[in-house]
Image: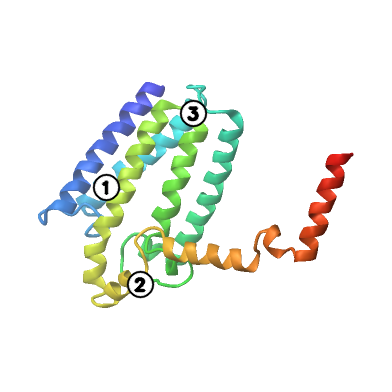
Amino acid sequence: MTTLLLAAGALAGAILTVLLGLTLTGRSLRIWPTPGKGTWQSLVFWFLFRTLNITAIALVIADWGSLGLVPFALRIAALAIAGVCAALYVRSLLSLGPTNTYCRRDGLVDRGIYRWTRNPQYATVIPAYLALALAADSAPALVLITLLVAVYVMMAYAEEPWLKAAYPGVYDRYARRVPRFYNWRRTRAFLRFGRRQFPPLHHRLTAAGMRHLAATQTLRKRD
């Protein structure tokens, strides 16, 4: 069963990455975003994409813990991270709406989580799958999840020319303001703000407090 799932997922992933690569490098083929519902591109893309996702998740379940290399505590922590990322992924889908999710024009969304990243679905589902791969502790699952990560990254890049054409000028201004995946600048600013608001304990102690702490430690050493 594991071998069959791996073969089916790897084949779907390999074909999909080739088609996405052709989409990114040439103008004669566009597999994503698809030209429309019912087109051969749409049928092929969604069949391969769903096959890859389903087989990856099935392998996580079927081959759970087969390597025996990852400590149990780390696997539990990774599973929790995957759950949080999955919840954020669902939240980003709800913010975008079903029409935009399938790359049909329903207005450029730049509010909520889209103020931090242009692709919150990919920015959340990628770490969710990577955390799931760590939790699964399975080589076959890791192979398919690696393919999935490559597919998601390529999808993000493939969408950009379509978005520029769909929202001329507006998307370019949005792209200059918001990063493709992760807003490290805002994250660093948030962390700096947190350090200013909640400085380390030794920075908050007064001189008298520091002397009292030093005296207490000295007494403890004597005892």
The earlier-in-sequence mark between 3 and 1 is 1
The answer to whether any part of residue 200 appears in the image is yes
- Element carrying mark 2: helix
In the structure shown, which secondary structural element does the residue marked by tag 3 occupy? loop
Q: Nearer the viewer, residue 168 or 29?
A: 168
User: Is residue 126 placed above or below 168 in the rendered structure?
Assistant: above
Residue at which label 2 appears: 177
Circle 3 Cα neighbour tier, 10 Å, few/some/many (<14 / 14–19 / ≥20): many
Q: Give the image's coloring scheme.
A: rainbow
The quarter holding residue 105 reads bottom left
The disc at residue 113 is none
Residue at the location (14% across, 52% down)? 25
Tag 1: residue type?
Answer: Phe
Q: Position of residue 75 (x, y in %)?
A: 56, 34
For the view shown, which residue lies furthest in the left direction? 28
Q: Which residue is mark 3?
A: 137
Q: Nearer the viewer, mark 3 or mark 1?
A: 3
| Contact check, label 3 and label 1, Cβ < 8 Å | no
Which residue type carries mark 3?
Asp
23 relative to 105 in the view: left or right: left
Q: Is residue 175 above or below residue 149?
A: below
Report the residue that reaches farthest toward the bottom.
169
Question: Whole-Å distance between the Cαs marked 3 and 2?
Answer: 38 Å
Q: Is residue 33 something one can see in this rendering? A: no
Q: Position of residue 174 (x, y in %)?
A: 33, 73
Q: Residue at x 49, y 22 (%)?
A: 66
With respect to residue 138, does 194 lie above or below? below
Q: Nearer the viewer, residue 219 or 171?
A: 219
